[in-house]
Amino acid sequence: MPRPIDILQKRTQDHALKVHAVQIMQERTGSFRYTRQVMSQLQEQVRKEIARLGGNELLEKIVGSLEVSLEEGDKST
């Protein structure tokens, strides 16, 4: 089977091939887990910055709506 980078470069419409690429990225490379961790850290930085600047309820709601749950993502790994 081709590597994930080869699959991505081909822009394939083959669902099975896409699933294979995602499985490799989840199981072997940990790239999704790493990405979720970085996103979580960035979100925490944003929340702290909002608080430091005096808070903003609307902005906090927007940030909350963009949140990616690490637990939710880990179900697929």
Image: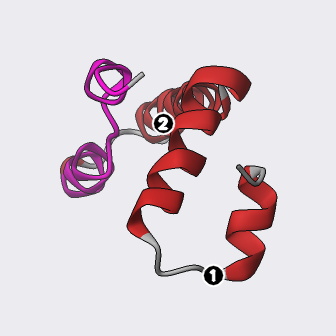
Q: Label 1, on which residue?
A: 11
Q: Residue at x 69, y 23 (%)?
A: 28
Which residue is drawn at the image coordinates 43% and 58% (left, top)? Answer: 16
Amino acid beneath label 2: Gln
Question: Residue 12: image x %, image y %?
Answer: 57, 79
Q: Is residue 1 above or below residue 45?
A: below
- Residue under the point 34% across and 27% down: 76
Marking on residue 43:
2
Q: Is residue 22 magenta?
A: no
Write the residue at 72% across / 80% down.
10
The crowd level at tag 1 (other Cα within 10 Å; few <14, some 14-19, many 20+) is few
Q: Tell me if mark 2 has few (under 14), some (14-19) or many (20+) residues whose alpha carbon lies within 10 angstroms of its own.
A: some
The image shows residue 19 at horizontal and vertical percentages of 45, 51
Q: Which region of the structure is painted magenta? A: 58-76
Report the amino acid beneath label 1.
Answer: Arg
Magenta: main secondary structure equals: helix
Magenta span includes 60: yes
39 on left or right of 16: right
Depth check, front residue: 6 or 47: 6
State left or right for residue 22 relative to residue 62: right
